[in-house]
Amino acid sequence: MGRFPSFGRFLFFWERRNHFQNGENKPLIPKGDVQKSEGTSVASFLGTHDSSGSQTSSSSSCHEGSTGASLRNFFTSRVLSSSSWSDYILKYLLITSNLLFTVLGLVTLVLGLWGLINKESFAQEKISGIGTDPMLLFAFLGLVLALLSLTGCVGALRENMCLLRTFSAAVLLLLMAQVLAAVLVYSLQGQIMEVLRSGMLTAMVRYQDDLDLRIITDEIQTSLQCCGADTYRDWEINVYFNCSAPGVQACGVPPSCCVDPLENGTVWNTQCGVGAQQLDEFSAQSVIFLGGCLGSISRWIEHNSGVIVTVVIILLGVQILTLFITAHLLQKIRWNRAQHDVYLQSLQ
């Protein structure tokens, strides 16, 4: 071998070359795995032999990537997840209650309009007295209630902040007006009674001409067992019941003033109050009610003051609860929108 050194080196090189070619023809690692291993080797090479600055940047980028992923997962779970059951209950409770009040307002509006149209209150000869028509009050209250409730219902259903703010402001104003009215009624009881007396006398004057006022007056006198504003002789202000009237009803009172307005217990006796004003009180008390309705109203209010206060407190409580639910829903909508904006920014 010492005499043929070049030949020995040639044989060694030839064996290494055949071994390399056999390794290429029959690879032990698939091509994809080779690429992965190469990437791993490169990464390990950079991590082993590169400077400390490149290691720090690599670990920092990995940390930022994991932080961004965790941040996205957090906001996804917080924003895209469903709300709690309490939020859903409060939201649909607000929608349902406003929907019911919308229907109630529409029914009241239709009833008021039907009364006005049925009595031909919009006719030219009757338009001057439409301001005192109770059906106009029904129509106005029905319209306001329907619009207000519909605003709250659509605002809660669509989660529209503008409609919800309008609804909340309107309910707040209505609540303040009711509280102010309750304070005025309590502090101005004498003036309120004078207003009631004036309204009662007006209804008595128009008793035969306005069907609604006649129905209301008859209902008050029948329910409270009274006649007139202060006494049964107040009916003299009506042109038909005045003693100087030419008709058969002169010096009489409406049948709703009678103690027994039904003839044989079944038929409404329209003549039971004829000539009642000509009788003295002792004789008239067996036929009609002698006391006026204003005194009966005062006694009814005093007797049912506890029920009235309870109803007022419940109504005010429902409106206050509605305000709190609306405020909670507005806060929830703002929070969801803010979180959604942050979530969108995290995706960029």
Image (cartoon, rainbow, N blue to C red):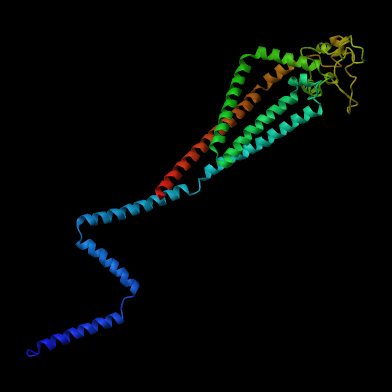
Q: Residue at x 31, y 70 (%)?
A: 35
Say whether residue 227 is visible: no
Give the percent coordinates (x, y) of residue 3: 7, 90
Q: Looking at the rendering, which quadrant does residue 55 occupy?
A: bottom left
Residue 18 or residue 183, whichever sits in front:
18
287 horizontally vs 24: left or right: right
Give the percent coordinates (x, y) of residue 6: 11, 86
Residue 221 or residue 148, whichever sits in front:
148
Instruction: Relative to 238, say whether 155 is above or below.
Output: below
Give the percent coordinates (x, y) of residue 118: 81, 29
Instruction: Relative to 124, say whether 59 is above or below.
Output: below
Residue 155 or residue 235, whichever sits in front:
155
332 horizontally vs 5: left or right: right
Q: Residue at x 60, y 39 (%)?
A: 154
| Image quadrant containing the N terminus | bottom left
Q: Residue furthest left?
A: 2
Say whether residue 205 is visible: yes
Q: Residue at x 61, y 35 (%)?
A: 151
